[in-house]
Amino acid sequence: MRRLGLTAAGLLAMLTLALTIVNTGRAKPSLAHTCTATDRQFIQEARSTMEELGLWSDAAPGDVVGQARAAAKHMGSMGPSDPSLEQTRRLMVGMLTEYAKAVRIQAKHGNAGPHMYRAYGLANYAHGVLARAQPSLVRMGCDLTPIL
């Protein structure tokens, strides 16, 4: 019974955090978009990272964890100047980190579900950020099609 209470408390905390993130994202005023060389580089790197993620499915779990961690570190070092791309960068770092945790736990025959759920949630939220920013960024010369 105590384990169920802890699980429920954990889920409630995650839901509260998710709602805070979503509401904080919606409450921000519309920000001016830019499309600099670093923005274009970020879009290219994000596309490459997502393509690589699909290729990792055949690799050993330890290799996948290492690749996901390296990709998170690399994405974390990127510096897009557009506010939406910067938000997407942070979300991708979180997604890759959660994905690495899920794969590591799965390899140890544990319950990877919560981490995978967070990874998918972060990916979906990043997609929403990009979809809303796309019209403005396209006008500035940044094509988001490769990462949408």
Image (spheres, helix red, strand yellow):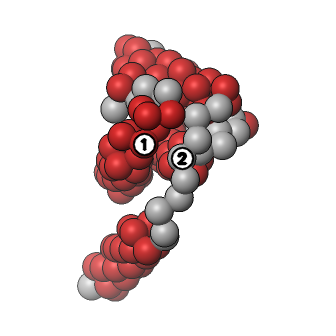
User: Given the current orientation, which residue lies at the most extreme front position?
Assistant: 139
Measuring from the top left, give residue 63's x and y in whole percent. 55, 21
Q: Which residue is mark 1?
A: 136
Of labels 2 and 1, earlier in sequence is 2
- Position above or below: 137 against 58: below
Disc 2: CA contacts within 10 A as few (<14), some (14-19) or many (>=20): some
Q: Which residue is mark 2?
A: 33
Q: Are marks 2 and 1 in contact (CB under 8 Å)?
A: yes
Position of residue 142 relative to residue 121, above or below, is above
Residue 59 sits in which quadrant? top left
* Left or right: 15 in relation to 139: left
Element under label 2?
loop
Q: Residue at x 27, y 85 (%)?
A: 1
Residue 72 horizontal/vertical position (percent) = 60, 37
Q: Amino acid at mark 2?
A: His
Q: Is residue 62 visible?
A: no
- What kind of element bears circle 1? helix
Distance, label 2 to label 1, CA atoms, is 6 Å
Residue that appears at 50% across and 34% down: 140
Q: Position of residue 37 (x, y in %)?
A: 67, 26
Crowd around label 1: few <14 · some 14–19 · many ≥20 (10 Å):
some
